[in-house]
Image (cartoon, grey):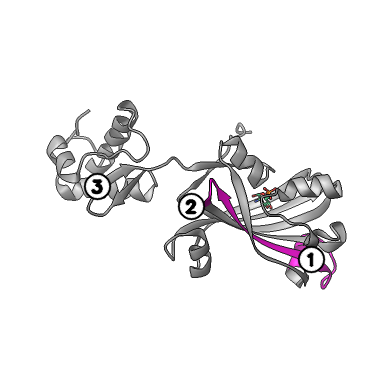
Amino acid sequence: MAIDPTSPIPKYSQLREILLDWIEETGLGVDDAIPSERELGALYGLSRMTVRQTIDHLVAEGKLYRVPGKGTFVARPKIEMSLALTSFTEDMRARGFTPDSQDLARRIDPASGHLARMLDIEPGSPIHHIERLRTADGEPMALERSNIPLSLVPGLDERSLAGRSLYQLLEEEYGILLDSGEQTIEAGICDPTDARLLGLPPGSAVLLMQRRSFANGRCVELAISTYRADRYQLHSTLDPRR
Ligand code: GLP
């Protein structure tokens, strides 16, 4: 395909489509190099600035990555975050990754007014607060901060979650089978502490997720999670218009 100078579509957008097609058609894989900006400019009769603009966009979208002094390479596809009441462990296993977790904090706190409202308990009631770094094949993926009323899971603080699924533990040891949930997801910027834990440059984009999960109408968990935006994208099927 060539650049059409008469098209109303900006040249950098045309080049974006050409490059994406070309990557697909040539079967270029993850970490394979694409031609240099100079080569692409010469090939498509474009200025270096236009080529750079296209590459900048594709890097920002997470489709390509640059290594200073080495070139531009095809990035790993992002993990599709499904909008379902699945656990991190299930999600990662289904995608062929080995999930794991590291406890960052485990404590019992009195519920603040806000947490109590979200969990539908009395303010000041004890809650388990669990902070975990979630990894897939050893790579940090997300930080998850879970709040669970103590009355529902007495003794949870004595049980190790190392390498273990919280949802599985709730089911197997407390007979709690989560059956519904609600979730909000918004864009955010990673603070320096979370960035360090996730191995990201400070100020990186993240997806902030808040999930309330229920069993038999009772709120069991309020989780506030930070997912790497360079590794995750949302995916959902769409209902027909009514
Ligand atoms: C998801 C949810 C969290 C939940 C976690 C449980 O990632 N966002 O709210 O705590 O799953 O995962 P696991 O059962 O693997 O510990």
Q: Position of residue 216 (x, y in %)?
A: 85, 46
Q: Residue at x 72, y 58 (%)?
A: 222
Circle 2: is it few (<14), some (14-19), or many (20+) Cα within 10 Å?
Answer: many
- Of residues 61 and 238, which is closer to you in this image? 61
Q: Residue at x 24, y 47 (%)?
A: 71
Provide the residue designation for mark 2: 229
Circle 3: is it few (<14), some (14-19), or many (20+) Cα within 10 Å?
Answer: few
Going by the numbered disc 3, the residue's amino acid type is Gly
**Disc number placed over residue 71 in the picture, else none:** 3
Q: CA distance from mark 2 to mark 3?
A: 23 Å
For the residues labelled 2 and 1, say whether their Cβ atoms are less than 8 Å apart: no
Magenta span of residues: 115-139
Q: Earlier in the sequence, mark 2 or mark 1?
A: 1
Going by the numbered disc 1, the residue's amino acid type is Ile
Circle 1: is it few (<14), some (14-19), or many (20+) Cα within 10 Å?
Answer: many
| Screen quadrant of the N terminus | top left
**Disc number placed over residue 173 in the picture, else none:** none
Q: Earlier in the sequence, mark 2 or mark 3?
A: 3
Is label 2 in a helix, a strand or a loop?
loop
Q: Residue at x 64, y 33 (%)?
A: 242
Q: Position of residue 98 (x, y in %)?
A: 58, 42
- Look at the numbered disc 1 and say if its residue's Cβ is closer than 8 Å to ligand 1: no
Q: CA distance from mark 3 to mark 1?
A: 50 Å
Going by the numbered disc 2, the residue's amino acid type is Ala
Residue 124 lies in quadrant: bottom right
Q: CA distance from mark 2 to mark 1?
A: 29 Å
Provide the residue designation for mark 1: 127
Task: Using the rendered image of the protein, determine whether residue 176 is visible from the camera's viewpoint.
Answer: no
